[in-house]
Image (cartoon, helix red, strand yellow):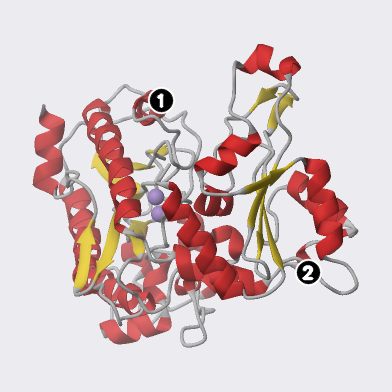
């Protein structure tokens, strides 16, 4: 945990920003896997973590904007629990550890909400993403579960986004800790990427490295020789020379700050000429994005600039024709990159995505695009110093999509479908780094993870 002063200051800011009424911030419950006592690993809710920092399950934080008081509600464990869990701090002790002076039981939470709400007064809360939290809110507020989202608070969302988007130095240090572990995950997996191995062996190695760094992975590892399937979570593939292996994986620290890194390597450690050609194009787009990212530019503009680099490269290979600006304006290049350049990252790997992407990645000035590809950009808004965003261009030859566009004659002015036929068995490549926006540019966070063709071949040769 950070010092209690950090959490006190965050809550004070939140009360000021929301301004009136009470704010309810539920922590998460344990989530059963196949029966009640066999649970998935516990993941605290990120909003609760940000404002209360505590890892215990079944807790609820409340901020009273009228009195300026903060509260922590939960039931103390009794001896029936303690024989299984060992001694644990009381709710009052946990509250004090993060600067909260008032604590109470869950029964007292019910009474507190009843006395502060009702007669048209709703507490501010975030729309829940878990069914059990929805059921709790429904019970506390006298709503049906289906009504809970409707009364969620947009001012609270905006206040949380406002604070969490700007990472403090101590948050950046945590993220860099997560990237240090990701370095071990990726460099180790590169060296294992030899023919005859299976994707699950490398995915398992990565999960082990994440655990050695004292956290879980930040999302299910993507480890695939079919990188053209964007979020391929299957791990049954056998590694063969001639395939590119896409490794998209990160971890969380013990405080749940994340990393999200992608490296793509040739099985066996030597790029062939086709692999090198595509790799250099994607790398140039990744570097261009890092060069351009700075306060004042929108990430939509950076996405578009990176797209121009990709389109220029595909023109050089004879896959696309025409003026680069026209290709990108029409979205023809998105056939080979149907996703956005990046997203915010912090306590969530897609930071704050539960608040609603339009409130996190966009604002009144920058609205989401409806164009294929650009429309999947999770963060498009103007960058500010302190943002942490991913820079993750890619190139994917998706046979089903190529066939569909070809049959429709889509962007036939720009796309050479005959040439593209020769690439349909290629797979995919993605390169992803985590960027901190600084006052005058952007810094790739963490110790550099091998990224150029030469660095990757050298690393895999050891
Ligand atoms: N891990 C999915 C992503 O890079 O956003
Ligand atoms: Mn990723
Ligand atoms: Mn990412």
- Residue 61 spot, x, y in % from top left: 65, 51
352 sits left or right of 196 in the view? right
Q: Residue at x 63, y 31 (%)?
A: 90
Q: Which mark is residue 413?
A: none
Q: In the image, what residue occupies the spot 38% across and 23% down?
A: 201
Question: Could you say where residue 369 lies in the image, as x and y percent from the top left?
Answer: 50, 80
SS under mark 1 = helix
Q: Quadrant for the N terminus, please.
A: top left
Q: Is residue 371 visible?
A: yes
**Side (left or right) of 287 relative to 169:** left
Please give the name of the residue rendered at 30% of the width and 81% of the height, measured from the top-left corner.
297
Ligand 1 contact, mark 1 (Cβ < 8 Å) = no
Q: To which residue does mark 1 refer?
A: 204
Mark 2 lies on residue: 151
Q: Quadrant of residue 198?
A: top left
Please state which of residues 171 and 290 is positioned toward the viewer in this rendering: 171
């Amino acid at each position: 945990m950070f010092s209690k002063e950090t959490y006190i200051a965050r809550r004070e800011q939140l009360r000021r920003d929301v301004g009136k009424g009470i704010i309810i911030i539920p922590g998460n419950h344990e989530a059963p896997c196949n029966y009640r006592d066999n649970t998935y690993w516990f993941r605290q809710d990120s909003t609760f973590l940000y404002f209360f920092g505590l890892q215990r399950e079944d807790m609820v934080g409340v901020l009273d904007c009228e009195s300026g008081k903060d509260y922590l509600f939960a039931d103390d464990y009794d001896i029936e629990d303690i024989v299984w869990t060992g001694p644990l701090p009381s709710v009052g002790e946990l509250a004090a550890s993060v600067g909260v002076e008032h604590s109470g039981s869950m029964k007292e939470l019910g009474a507190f909400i009843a006395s502060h709400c009702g007669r048209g007064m709703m507490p501010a809360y975030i729309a829940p993403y878990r069914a059990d939290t929805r059921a709790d809110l429904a019970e506390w507020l006298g709503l049906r579960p289906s009504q809970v989202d409707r009364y969620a608070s947009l001012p609270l969302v905006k206040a949380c986004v406002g604070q969490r988007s700007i990472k403090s130095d101590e948050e950046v240090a945590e993220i860099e800790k997560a990237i240090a572990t990701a370095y071990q995950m990726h460099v180790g997996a590169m060296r294992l990427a030899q023919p005859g191995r299976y994707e699950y062996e490398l995915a398992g190695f990565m999960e082990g490295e994440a655990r050695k760094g004292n956290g879980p992975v930040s999302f299910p590892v993507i480890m695939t020789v079919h990188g053209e399937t964007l979020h391929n979570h299957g791990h049954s593939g056998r590694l063969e020379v001639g395939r590119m292996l896409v490794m998209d994986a990160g971890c969380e620290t013990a405080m749940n700050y994340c990393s999200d890194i992608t490296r793509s390597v040739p099985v066996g450690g030597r790029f062939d000429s086709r692999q090198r050609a595509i790799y250099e194009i994607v790398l140039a787009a990744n570097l261009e994005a890092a060069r351009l990212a700075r306060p004042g530019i929108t990430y939509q503009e950076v996405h578009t600039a990176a797209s121009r680099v990709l389109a220029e490269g595909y023109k050089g290979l004879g896959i696309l024709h025409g003026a680069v600006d026209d290709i990108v304006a029409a979205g023809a290049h998105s056939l080979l990159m149907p996703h956005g350049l990046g997203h915010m990252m912090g306590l969530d790997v897609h930071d704050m995505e539960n608040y609603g992407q339009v409130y996190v990645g966009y604002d009144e000035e920058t609205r989401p695009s409806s164009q294929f590809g650009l429309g999947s950009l999770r963060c498009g808004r103007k960058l500010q110093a302190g943002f942490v965003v991913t820079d993750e261009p890619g190139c994917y030859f998706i046979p089903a999509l190529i066939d569909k566009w070809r049959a429709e004659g889509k962007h036939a002015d720009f796309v050479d479908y005959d040439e593209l036929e020769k690439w349909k068995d290629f797979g995919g490549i993605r390169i992803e780094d985590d960027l901190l926006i600084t006052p005058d540019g952007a810094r790739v966070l963490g110790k550099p993870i091998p990224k150029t063709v030469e660095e990757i071949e050298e690393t895999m040769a050891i």
